[in-house]
Amino acid sequence: MIIRLKDINKTYPGVVPLHVLKDINLDIDRGELVAIMGASGSGKSTLLNILGILDNYDSGEYYLDYVLIKNLSENKAAELRNRMIGFVFQSFNLISYKNAIENVALPLFYQGVSRRQRNRLAMEQLERMGLADRAHHLPGELSGGQKQRVAIARALITNPSIILADEPTGALDSTTSRDVMQLFRQLNDDGMTIVIVTHDPNVGAATNRIIRISDGRIETPQPITV
Amino acid sequence: MKNPIFDIENWREIGATLARNKTRTFLTAFGIFWGTAMLAMLWGGAHGMEGMLRRNFAGFTTNFGAIFPNTTSVSYHGFNKGMTWQMTQSDIDAIRRITPYIEYSTTLIDREGTIVYGSNSTSATIAGYEPDFAKINLAVVYSGRVFNKADEARTAKVAVIGKDLAATLFGNDDPLGKYVSANGVFVRIIGVIGQLSNASIGTRYDSSLIMPSSTFRNIFNYGNKVGFFMYTAAPGHSPKEIETYIRRVICANHPISPDDDKAMWFMDISEDFKMLDTLFLGVSLLALFVGTGSLMAGIIGIGNIMWIIVKERTQEIGIRRAIGAKPRDIITQILCEGVALTSIAGLAGVSFATIVLAIADKLTADPVLGSANFTLTFTQALAIVITFLILGTAAGTLPAIKAMHIKPIEAMRDK
């Protein structure tokens, strides 16, 4: 069980407090390819932020790779994010003034890995993504699909426990989207656990399990009919 | 984790960040450069201005005083007011006997006369001084020597000649050992002298013939007459203290009322110098005030740029944190960027100011009086750079710390 959520509750305080996650229980096994789907406002982004240790929750328990993630200091959270989670974002979130290989190598900088070692590992990841010839291009010189593959390479470089992807195809055209989903399937075949948050049914259909969330609750799981 | 200061990886990352954002780096660096340069130039400039003013009085003793006879304003002892009186050598002897604080003193007496050497003749001031005159209003001795106490005692027919007068009479010849006629009496030239200071009391050395006072009185039949009397107060005393003694002697020797404050005119240069000191203090304070202003402006400028940079980098900071940068990593990075930029640009600014000051110093240098001291001390330069380093970096770090309070996920969404 790589991810175990037990009775997770999250309320955003305010004049009218917003109870966004209500008693969420969720288990994800190692090696799964899961889609979390729901309409906007359903709480799926909040759930992803909690899974990614980017946000905390009010009650319940969250175990990531058997480590209890609760009330962590910002330093501890940063360290766990760095070692256990690979993020892929809708808007790629590459650093614009760094070239592809530097962007991919950046997580290792924060682990204190030497430059030579960093660049070697980053180059390996870029080769795996078929982007070896683009290693010294700035993000601005890459297409959307290439940028997303650089972001995926960056997510993979620390050899994380899971990949969390937030609408990874949201900014891509349908052909490129299919390629990126193909890539995720391939990574999953190699044993990587991947959780994708999306509202695109085609993306959901390309995964092995769909978790539907609406109004802060997980709907009863349904078998996928192909 | 390794100490970021000694971690080459950290500095490589910072170097790359600064090098990749050329415009931003240049603008910030220029702001710091300009701020430090302005402050340094202002500070050194004020120093130089003071030097330029002060050197006009170089060689001029500041605790200097003099007494001149004047007409009486109170009738006394059967004499009407408006009477003139003559100062004599016996007055001077009495003053020297009873006044404790005199360091150097000289009587002065002078007249216009015709000086002849060979076929050259010119009219000039002929003055009689005592040997200490050159210690009160310092003289530059170009060649030979100034007459001494022995010359004074034996009424030697010797004189020192001002450099301009020497040039008129002798051209390129060496005046030393030659005889000139002063109103028909021959005296031997033993030295060529000139003014050190632009300010002078009594005779201008450059265009005068100066001989021992005994010789002067002897040659021109002045008896024991004295024109006026100059003195310097001993260290720790002011010329003002000496006035009381002089007044007592003069009132005892001459029919002058003790209440008559017009009969003697005292010159006390120390009062004027005190005013000058106040003026210099004012100039320094003004420079400090303007300097603080430009410092503030510089810091606000840097802070502003840093603020924009951090704002602009909110997304970058968010990304870095999402992929595992600890708050300390981010703060350290921004801090190190600030330190690197400020030290390089600050040192460049101070260096630039030093060059400008050196040029100003060269241009205003005087052949006799020397440099006006358009300079910055090492401590001042260091103080400027360190102030900018601390304030500039703090100005940059505050927004960075503030950026830490934004959740990475929100920072990344920030466009």
Image (tube, rainbow, N blue to C red):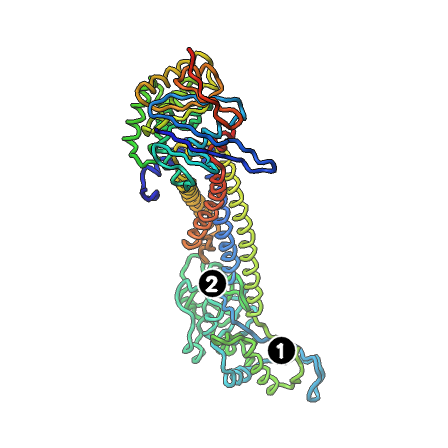
Residue drawn at the location 49% of the way across and 57% of the way down: B51
Q: Which amino acid is tagged 1?
A: Met
Residue at (39% x, 14% y) in the render? A179
Q: Chain of mark 2?
A: B
**Residue marked by disc 2:** B194
Position in image of residue B32 (x %, y %): 47, 43
The quadrant in which the N terminus of chain B is found is top left
Q: Which residue is at a point 51% across and 68% down the rendered structure image? A: B62
Kind of residue sitting beneath label 2: Gly
Decide: is B198 above or below A205: below
Q: Is residue A180 left or right of residue A17?
A: left
> How far separated are the C-alphas under marks 1 and 2?
30 Å
Q: Is residue B48 above or below residue A137?
A: below
A1 or A187, which is in the foreground? A1
Whether label 1 touches label 2, CB < 8 Å? no
Query: Residue A34: percent from the left, percent from the top?
Result: 40, 21
Residue B264, disc: 1
Image-quadrant location for residue B259: bottom right
Residue B350: percent from left, percent from top: 44, 46
Q: Chain of mark 1?
A: B
Q: Residues within 10 Å of mark 1 (few under 14, many from 20)?
A: many
Percent position of residue B213, x then y: 49, 76
Give the camera-side residue of B415 and B216.
B415
Q: Horizontally, is A195 left or right of B7 in the view?
A: right
User: Is residue B293 depicted above or below A35 in this figure?
Assistant: below
Q: How many numbered marks are there?
A: 2
Can residue B337 be seen in this snapshot? no
Question: Which is nearer the eye, A118 or B394?
Answer: A118
* Mark 2 Cα shell of 10 Å, populated few (<14), some (14-19), many (≥20): many
